[in-house]
Amino acid sequence: MTLALRRKGRLYRSIAVMTFKQYLAYNLWFWVQLLGQILMMTVFVFFWRAVYAGRGTVGGLEQQQTITYILLAQMIAPLVQWGQILPMGDLVREGMIAIELTRPVDLQERFYIETLSSLGYSLLQQVLTVGLFARFVFHLQLPSDPAIWAAFGLTLLLGNAILFCFDWMFACLAFYSTEVWGLHVVREGTVMFFSGALVPLVMLPGWLQSVASWMPFSQALYTPVALLSGIIPAAQAPQVWLVQLAWLAALAVGSRVVFRLAVRKVTVQGG
Amino acid sequence: MPTIELSHVSKVYRTIKKDSGLRGAVKALFRPHYVEKVAVHDLSFHVDAGEVVGYIGVNGAGKSTTIKMLTGILHPSGGSIRVLGRDPHRERVANAREIGVVFGQRTQLWWDLALRESLNLIANIYELEPARYRQLLAEFAQTLELEELLSVPIRSMSLGQKMRAELAATFLHQPRVVYLDEPTIGLDVMVKERIRAFIRDQNQRNGTTVMLTTHDLDDIEQLCQRVIIIDAGSVVYDGPLSTIKQRFGTFRSIAFETAHPLEIEHLILPLGTAIASHGERALEVRFDRTVTSASQVATALMPQIEAIDFSLAEPDLESIIKQIYAGTHTAALREEVLV
Ligand SMILES: Nc1ncnc2c1ncn2[C@@H]1O[C@H](COP(=O)(O)OP(=O)(O)OP(=O)(O)O)[C@@H](O)[C@H]1O
Ligand SMILES: [Mg+2]
């Protein structure tokens, strides 16, 4: 039992390390992306300052709270932006799915470990670049209570797992049709809006808020960021986790079922 | 219990047929027109432990499709498959642990990683004991001449280097069954030899069952005691290599080189012979051993063409397979399989 665990640990570690190395291989892309992000962040800050001009609160939030939220949301946004549709589409279109399916590792499990690894990597990268920029240029203010940080961490992790399971179901559509680019575009737009990357969800009209709450996206961005920026009080964290666990349970089961069905449909492109 | 067992397996690919242009694309979206392609039809055979089987057939015969079903990637449309007692599709992950596979046109190694790192990762994926892994790595590095390649990323390897690396990766976890789909495609003779020697060695030492798909008949002659020939998705021959050779090696050929340009029209050919090919000063004649003999053919032709040299070709598998592929023997083979 412990031996099996140790082996699994070794496997997961090596998948994570590999993901990490592959990220490092794309250096140039990283700087371009960084520039874009800093630009976005600046635009957002000026936009919200203009909105708040002469007003105390907007949608129940004070200016400082909103700016903190938006800065954090922009840092987390790259972690929810991509999803699994394109990588899976590539695997299927290029026929590499054949290789992946002959490995004695569950494909979904492997994708999850990779997602987790890139979560860690992106987070580190975001904090060290955009994070420092936000701190020194826009005076990003963060809580000092380690309990809030821990709650944030756990919420982010759960939210990431929820989003992963959701994305996995759509990624499985690549087994049915290799033309998944359109699907990816729709997903990206929907996720960017309903995850709360652009606007704190509490500011939305009631009906839109309830639409957002019936989608899993906010769990991966809005909820953790709202916790960290104080929009959701720390005392509510346990409730938040309960909701997240419910989402996770439902989507984990759903994604397994969809995967099992989709694998039957695999056709491998090319010799 | 056979190691690999297929009974009445079929595979139908269903694809959406699109007319060209935007109009076609839109039409396909709303009213898709499916075309079905039967790649494998009523395929049955079994392979016992430790056998090395050559699985051959023309392009599009259904070889790769069969291999993909055997590895559990593809779900057969009909019939049943058992590999080591399991349904490879339903128990794909468990099956994967015990098999190895090479798809000649793809790599299972990580493009950007050095070979050593890729192999480390594979050792972890297959949960190899570290000590055993080190031992095998040293062994493979030697037999496949990989020492210098261990620090090279896959993307900067030549085709031959890549394939050697690929084989090391495939056999690293000591699989009981290995499928090789065109492992020697595009390689030079030296590399082919090395790869064959490696496969033979693994088979003899570990009793690995090997199914080999190839268009290179030297591969077959050197590795396989048994061949399965498929055509249009069904078996047309399954048996020892020697039988095909005996039975269908009735045609042999003699090649002549002549002193003067040939005048083909004026040649008088003896009974049971036909011109296989000719050039300005070269002539190849194919004859039926049951009707005539090499010396009779030579005697009849030499005076007519002023030959300065001639050679008799051994009946090689290639020409036999060519005849089978051309359909000359398909009917005869079918009968034999049925009898
Ligand atoms: N993904 C696919 N979708 C539709 N048809 C396919 C697909 N893959 C293969 N086919 C068709 O099925 C038939 C068998 O293909 P397969 O790849 O098994 O042939 P093969 O014997 O491996 O040929 P080769 O020697 O060229 O590799 C071919 O007619 C091919 O066009
Ligand atoms: Mg093929």
Image (spheres, grey):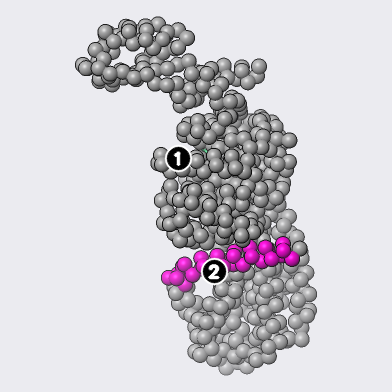
Is ligand 1 less than 8 Å from the beta carbon at label 1?
Answer: no
> Which numbered disc covers residue A20?
2
Split into 4 quadrants, where in the image is the C terminus of chain B? top right
> Which of labels 2 and 1 is toward the front?
1
| Stretch of the chain drawn in magenta | A2-30
> Which numbered disc covers residue A30?
none
* Residue B183 in view here: no
Query: With respect to residue A19, does B169 lie above or below?
Result: above
Provide the residue designation for mark 1: B193
Mark 2: few, some, or many residues within 10 Å (few <14, many ≥20)? some
Measuring 65% from the left and 53% from the top, which residue is drawn there? A104
Find residue B47 and report its horizontal and vertical position in percent: 65, 34
Find residue B135 and report its horizontal and vertical position in percent: 57, 56
- In depth, the one of A256 and B302 nearer the eye is B302
- Name the amino acid, label 1: Glu
Q: Is residue A15 magenta?
A: yes
